[in-house]
Image: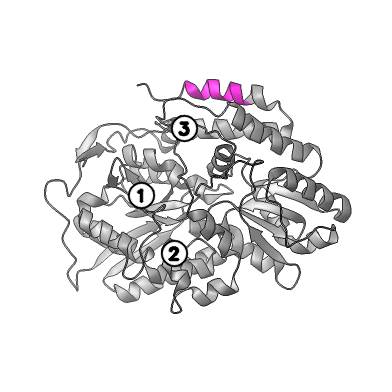
Amino acid sequence: MKKTLPALVALVTSAAALTACGGLGTTTTESSASGSGPVPELGPDQQVSIVFESYNYGMAGAWTDTFNALIADFTKLHPNIKVTAQKPQGNSPNPATDTISSIQSQTVAGTPPDVAQLGFSDLDFTIHQLGAKPLDDLVGTESVQKNFDGAKYPYAPTARTLGDWEGTTYGVPFVFSTPVFYYNATLFEQAGLDPTQPPTTWDQVADAAAAIAAKTGKGGVYLDCLTKTAKDWCFQSLVRSNGGQVISDDRSTLTFADDPAVQVTAMAQDLVRSGATPKLSQQQGYEAFARGDLGMILETSAIQGTFIKGAKDKWDLRATTMPAFAAKTTVPTNSGASLFTFASDPAKQRASWELIKYLTSEQAYTKIAQGIGYLPLRTGLVDDPAGLQDWAQKNPLLAPNLAQLKSMEPWISMPGNNYLQIRDGMMDAVEASVYQDADPKSTLEAAQKQASTLLPAE
């Protein structure tokens, strides 16, 4: 088990410069619990205040409402712990995009949040540059594993270690989805398609999208995997489902210009060229689907509540698993985030752990699944009459996500301080190819050549 990790000491550079370069220094410091055992339990009357930063607070409606309810419930259970909730600093259309720069800026100011929700694609950087604390050291491996085991239901096996690094748990996987293929059964019928037989391959998707566009005048399909704003979780899933990957297993070589990725990009480009996919931003895409102006969308279940609200009493919303590339096996990856602590004070570290435990409890996942649509990572809840059984039976949209959780593979984070530039450069190339008609092969090759210079030296 590691006892040291890179920490944040070079704090003389401006936040803007830090965001641009992607790093905060590489010196090391002892974790507060290292060599001294778990941090002490809080006394019953010991007052502690902590800050919880979550990108869900940058999203109005079900996201904020659900999280406010969770924090209120936690406060009733732990009246001695005051939680101040906030969204990341920044104004990106997707607030999750602001998480890293927000924590960098606050760290420079000496006030990082105590608990933060950070994406799986940020894992390497979160641990080695932002200085997330190893939970195994802070509270003990036994306590960490006991939380995964749950009061009643354990975590799904494929989710349990997504916040680990080299055998040590730094983050507790919190909320995520696999790529769900939502479709408008009403438009299917209007286009002469059978809504009980949704497409199972991307060739079938192209045919169905063309029929919808031609016969209804609506958009055929939108893949929320193909822009920089969308990040690369879903693009990774498409590429892996086509037999490729975006980086080698040893994380030393970029492979997103190999044939499988080029073929995925060309397939999406053909959907745009044919008129089956309208040219929309990420937000425009899911808003159009919610209005009933799109036949199909590949999307995270985090947007499911928006779709349900938009479809209510207007059109028939359904969902299925991600389509395949011909006879190849699909490889769903996960979106979403883990919960980490950056607290240095032992009392705040213990309070942070109490919050992390509650937010990943059976009680919390019941609210999260019902309120937002994220997967309940304690999957036994869907068979529990006192948990999510009744809700799950009334909400068949959950089924594809649960089915794909069993075969899910991790969303891989890019390595080094320049990981954001690598990821964004890749997705800029994909977006340019799909929506600006650039040549997929040469555009991806140029982006990969440039990104390869940003990989950490061996």
Mark 2 or 1, nearer chain start: 1
| Mark 2–mark 3 distance (CA, rounded to whole Å) | 40 Å
Please name the residue shown 70% across and 71% down the image. 312
Chief secondary structure of the magenta span? helix
Quadrant (top left/top right/bottom left/bottom right) for the C terminus: top left
**With respect to residue 346, does 103 lie above or below?**
above
Circle 3: element type: helix
Residue 36 visible in image:
yes
Q: Which residue is mark 2?
A: 379
Left/right of residue 387 with respect to residue 204 in the rendered view: left
Q: Which residue is mark 3?
A: 20
- Find the residue positioned furthest to the left: 36
Circle 2: element type: helix
Please name the residue shown 41% across and 38% down the image. 15
Residue 348 visible in image:
no
| Mark 2–mark 1 distance (CA, rounded to whole Å) | 16 Å
Q: Measured from the top left, where is residue 112 in percent x and y?
A: 34, 49
- Find the residue positioned furthest to the right: 215
Specify the amino acid type for callout 2: Thr
Mark 3 or 1, nearer chain start: 3
Q: Is residue 452 magenta?
A: yes
Q: Which residues are magenta?
A: 444-453
Q: Nearer the viewer, mark 2 or mark 3?
A: 2
Specify the amino acid type for callout 1: Thr
Q: Which residue is mark 1?
A: 161
Mark 2 or 3, nearer chain start: 3
Circle 1: element type: loop
